[in-house]
Image: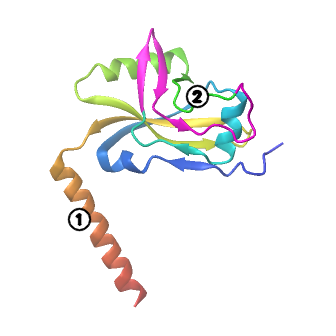
Amino acid sequence: MAHPKANINIKNRKASFEYELIERLVAGMQLTGTEIKSIRNGKVSMNDAYCQFFGGELFAKNIHISEYELGNINNHPAKRDRKLLLTKRELEKMERKLKESGFTIIPTRMFINDRGLAKLEIALARGKKIYDKRETLKQKDSKREIDRMMKH
């Protein structure tokens, strides 16, 4: 049974501007009941979010999932670390690549799949230099200008 608000698609807009995204992967998350309800209501912010390994497991840090309005004393803390659910092979591959210099893992998108489960798309990324960011802005501006010309 699909949830009526299953079209949740929350993006980390800063990710593609701040980082060069190299490889993407979709992971499940270990969530509490009030967290999934807040996600279904779209109450998520992923600005400044990142992923980090602890004891061979990957955790998403700094993802702000607002407390559930109808929650009680069992409500979740908004910025707790959330364990990501990946296969052992995927984890080992990511950890190996993370050890290469300049790489980090960042959440790029959170969505609810067709089975009603919250998923987090993560990306192996490398930080962009200032001139790369300027280049990204120039490309966006020129694309916008071309689109404007096509409409007239």
Q: Residue furthest bottom?
A: 152
In the image, 53: left or right of 143?
right
Q: Residue at x 45, y 11 (%)?
A: 56
Residue wearing tag 2: 77
Q: Residue at x 28, y 70 (%)?
A: 141
In the rendering, at what x and y percent does residue 36 appear? 68, 35
Image quarter hosting the C terminus: bottom left
In the rendering, at what x and y percent does residue 80 appear? 53, 26
Residue wearing tag 1: 138
In the image, 33: left or right of 100?
right
Dot 2 crowding, Cα within 10 Å, few <14, some 14–19, many 20+: few
Tell me which corner region of the image, top left, top right, bottom left or bottom right, holds residue 1: top right
Q: Is residue 134 above or below residue 30?
A: below
Secondary structure at badge 2 equals: loop
User: Residue 51 colored magenta?
Assistant: yes
Q: CA distance from mark 2 to mark 1?
A: 40 Å
Q: Which residues are magenta?
A: 50-74
Q: Residue furthest right?
A: 1
User: Residue 63 colored magenta?
Assistant: yes
Secondary structure at badge 1 equals: helix
In the rendering, at what x and y percent does residue 110 appear? 56, 42
In the rendering, at what x and y percent does residue 89 appear? 49, 17
Query: Which amino acid does the dot numbered 2 rest on?
Result: Pro
Tell me which corner region of the image, top left, top right, bottom left or bottom right, holds residue 123: top left
